[in-house]
Image (cartoon, rainbow, N blue to C red):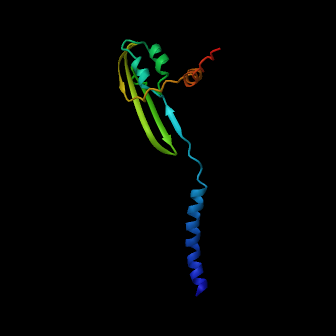
Amino acid sequence: MKAKVLILLLPIALATSACSVANFLTPYKLDIPQGNEITADQVAKLKTGMTHSQVRFLLGTPLLTDPFHANRWDYLYSDARAGVLRDKKSYVLIFEGDSLVSFSGETLPAPAKFQSAETSVASAVTPAPAAKE
């Protein structure tokens, strides 16, 4: 009787332990940002009438160029953390000939300004008053 119960419970025990082992052996999932990061400060520099080369210099090469719509450039950005899509943005530029006509879409926030190490140290340290003789 005990042998029959053991034979019936053994596959269940092996199956449940295999699930926990599979979770333990799952590979690390990388944080993967992909595409063009278009920030608000970059978009502030865009102006209608800019040429293809000026826009490419400012924003970089677009991720997608549609061969059927050569006048449209799509800048796409996605950010996946631990295998989960957290952020997805797209920015579209429309050209007429070689000049920019319109642009719209979602941008990333402008990066914070960096302070130089000398500035932060200089403001933190105040000179000692000179000794009177």
Residue reaching furthest bottom? 1
| Residue located at (55% from left, 67% from top) | 16
Q: Tell me: residue 44, above or below residue 11.
A: above
- Residue nearest the observer in this picture, 29 or 117: 117
- Residue nearest the observer in this picture, 67 or 10: 10
Q: Is residue 22 left or right of residue 98?
A: right
The image quadrant of residue 18 is: bottom right
| Residue located at (38% from left, 30% from top) | 106
Image quadrant holding the C terminus, namely: top right
Residue reaching furthest right? 133
Image quadrant holding the N terminus, namely: bottom right
Q: Position of residue 108 (x, y in %)?
A: 43, 30
- Residue nearest the observer in this picture, 11 or 13: 13
Q: Is residue 20 left or right of residue 111?
A: right
Q: Position of residue 74 (x, y in %)?
A: 42, 26
| Residue located at (38% from left, 13% from top) | 97
Q: Tell me: residue 129, above or below residue 21.
A: above
Q: Position of residue 104 (x, y in %)?
A: 35, 25
The image quadrant of residue 43 is: top left
Q: Position of residue 70 (x, y in %)?
A: 41, 21
Task: State the count of labels.
Answer: 0
Q: Tell me: residue 32, above or below residue 3.
A: above
Q: Is residue 26 left or right of residue 77?
A: right
